[in-house]
């Protein structure tokens, strides 16, 4: 099993979800996160107090899929999240040791 | 003989009728007078009760939201509590002794105890202040001003003052600063009361000196005495929720109609004039602030817009019942620009941590407004000032009374002086008795948890 963790632009979330649904991936966990890579932030001013904001809002998608599906999922995420501009985000892939469905103790691919 | 009897018999009812005609008319006229009086009282009283409610709404939720949104997430409840608790504590003190000290006729500096425990404050009007509404209405209306004034100060000590010290500070501040100043400016025989035999006649329609200078200047003293927040200018201290602040500022704008137009103390044309002046001044102040901000920073901010609105509302407060719409706009516009520089350039030059700019907006805006009132006040708007023969007297510089500007400056100076000295003494007392500032750990943790044992936003709820 592979865990695919994608950090994307918040406004691309719907596109990515739709594309994943298109290839039969329904399960995922998302969270609102902040971060930056090479992308520069912006300046905010509150009553004369200036703040350089480097950490920008992003969305993190996490999903675990069977090994044989991972290449297809990664390609789908990358394609649907891309705008071609700096700040599009990154995808990280991890090996997963085990997956357990809490409801009935299913293990492995069957738990996904 | 029988003829005379007939005559008398005929005349008797006619005479009786002739006598009864004037008395019936008189009765009807006096009934009519009573009905007219009662109709006027009903009109005035309904407006004043609504105004009282509007002014209370300025503190809660208006100011609570405005200030609450500007602080960091960990201090949102503590900051809102600074406004909310005053709705309770000031009310009780006001009923016991505050109203009497402010509005009882006593010395030029402070009232007496004639209205202690609201004694004799009932349905009968008090013609010294408002002849057409129950004195109880006048009393509850004035209470709302006493509530918001100390709440305004809390903007300066937000995020770092102990709750116990804040309570003690507020109570002492009412007695040492607010009640005397309200009496001097508005009380019968008060030193600065232009309309009731004050020796230094000042015009302050709705509280430029009593409310805004007193609170704004006291706020500066608090900011200097308490010192800066930990991490000031090194850690980010962005407003945690400007949406709350926008809602709060808009509620302040609406509530301010009760504050200023209500200060006419009647549903009169003067109330309309104050309402109109208030609105136009505020609109112009928004534009003034945003214009300068846009030119200097390249972007007009929402926080700038709402701060400009409050600056305009503050500045027009003393002038609202004395000036025409276009001078009102000018006052607002000037205040918007002045307050922008106060909270940006001036504050950063001197480096004091006036957390939510209570001084920069209320102290500065109040001072600008009070002085400009002496310039633009006109008898074309307010005919309240009369000589002994009952002739209406000219008011400000534009009425040909340049001396009024000087009177206003003296009134401003007295308010500044009382606020500075009074607040310093009170802070010393509070510091000795309970300590004014929270511990470093409590400050890091935030006042919501350290002072009140709760959080504004609960993730798991």
Image (cartoon, rainbow, N blue to C red):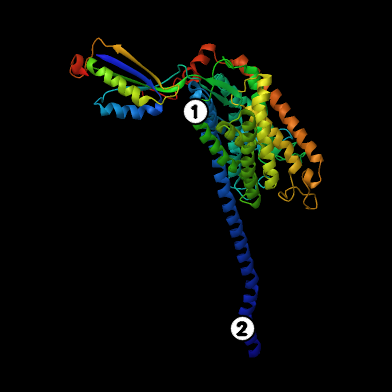
In-image side of B315 versus A74 (left or right) = right
Report in which chain the residue with disc 2 lies. Answer: B
> Is B114 or B380 nearer to us in this picture?
B380
Q: Position of residue B459 (x, y in %)?
A: 38, 23
Are discs 1 and 2 less than 8 Å apart at CB? no
Quadrant assignment, res B330: top right
In-image side of A22 versus B451 (left or right) = left
Instruction: Kindly identify the residue that appears in the image at 47 percent across and 21 percent down.
Output: B452
Report in which chain the residue with disc 1 lies. Answer: B
Q: Where does the C terminus of chain B fall, quadrant-wise?
A: top left
Q: Is residue B96 above or below residue A81?
A: below
Q: Which residue is mark 1?
A: B241
Q: Residue furthest top?
A: A97
Pair 1/2: label in front: 1
Q: Position of residue B385 (x, y in %)?
A: 75, 47
Q: Which residue is mark 2?
A: B9
Quadrant assignment, res B426: top right
Quadrant assignment, res B285: top right
Q: Is residue A48 above or below residue B44?
A: above
Q: Where does the N terminus of chain B fall, quadrant-wise?
A: bottom right
Is disc 2 placed on a helix, strand or loop?
A: helix
């Amino acid at each position: 099993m592979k865990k695919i963790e994608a950090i994307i632009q918040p406004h691309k979330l719907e596109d990515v979800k739709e594309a994943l649904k298109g290839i039969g991936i329904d399960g995922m966990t998302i969270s609102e996160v902040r971060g930056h890579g090479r992308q520069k932030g912006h300046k905010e001013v509150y009553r004369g107090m200036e703040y350089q904001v480097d950490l920008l809002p992003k969305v993190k998608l996490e999903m675990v899929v069977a090994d044989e599906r991972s290449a297809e999922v990664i390609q789908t995420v990358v394609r649907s999240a891309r705008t071609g501009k700096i700040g599009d985000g990154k995808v990280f892939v991890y090996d997963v040791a085990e997956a357990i469905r809490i409801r009935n103790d299913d293990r492995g691919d069957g738990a996904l | 003989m029988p003829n005379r009897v007939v005559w008398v018999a005929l005349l008797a009812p006619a005479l009786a009728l002739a006598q009864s005609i004037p008395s019936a008319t008189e009765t009807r006229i006096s009934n009519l007078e009573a009905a007219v009086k009662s109709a006027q009282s009903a009109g005035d009283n309904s407006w004043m009760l609504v105004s009282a409610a509007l002014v209370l709404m300025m503190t809660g939720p208006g100011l609570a939201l405005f200030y609450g949104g500007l602080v960091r997430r960990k201090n949102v409840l503590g900051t809102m509590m600074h406004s909310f608790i005053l709705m309770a504590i000031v009310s009780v003190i006001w009923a016991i002794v505050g109203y009497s000290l402010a509005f009882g006729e006593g010395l030029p500096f402070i009232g007496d105890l004639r209205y202690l425990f609201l004694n004799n404050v009932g349905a009968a009007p008090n013609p010294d202040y408002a002849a057409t509404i129950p004195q109880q209405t006048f009393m509850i209306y004035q209470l709302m001003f006493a509530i918001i004034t100390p709440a305004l100060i809390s903007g300066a000590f937000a995020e770092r003052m102990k709750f116990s010290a804040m309570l003690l500070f507020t109570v002492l501040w009412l007695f040492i600063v607010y009640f005397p100043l309200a009496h001097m400016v508005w009380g019968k025989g008060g030193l600065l009361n232009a309309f009731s035999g004050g020796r230094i006649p000042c015009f302050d329609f709705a509280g430029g000196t009593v409310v805004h200078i007193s609170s704004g200047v006291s706020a500066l003293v608090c900011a200097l005495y308490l010192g800066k927040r930990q991490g000031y200018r090194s850690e980010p201290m962005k407003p945690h929720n400007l949406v709350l602040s926008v809602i709060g500022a808009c509620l302040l704008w609406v509530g301010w109609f009760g504050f200023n137009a209500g200060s006419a103390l009647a549903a009169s044309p003067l109330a309309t004039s104050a309402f109109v002046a208030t609105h136009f001044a505020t609109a112009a102040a928004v534009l003034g602030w945003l214009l300068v901000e846009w030119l200097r920073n390249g972007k007009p901010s929402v926080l700038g817009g709402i701060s400009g609105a409050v600056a305009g509302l503050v500045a027009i407060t003393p002038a609202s019942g004395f000036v025409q719409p276009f001078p009102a706009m000018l006052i607002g516009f000037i205040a918007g620009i002045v307050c922008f520089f106060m909270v940006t350039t001036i504050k950063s030059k001197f480096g004091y941590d006036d957390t939510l700019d209570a001084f920069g907006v209320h102290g500065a805006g109040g001072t600008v407004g009070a002085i400009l009132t002496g310039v633009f006040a006109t008898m074309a708007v307010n005919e309240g000032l009369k000589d002994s023969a009952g002739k209406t007297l000219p008011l400000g510089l534009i009425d040909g009374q340049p001396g009024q500007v000087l009177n206003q400056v003296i009134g401003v100076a007295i308010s500044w002086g009382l606020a500075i000295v009074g607040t310093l003494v009170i802070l010393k007392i509070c510091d000795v008795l309970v300590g004014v500032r929270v511990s470093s750990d409590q400050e890091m943790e935030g006042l919501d948890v350290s002072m009140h044992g709760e959080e504004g936003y609960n993730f798991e709820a």
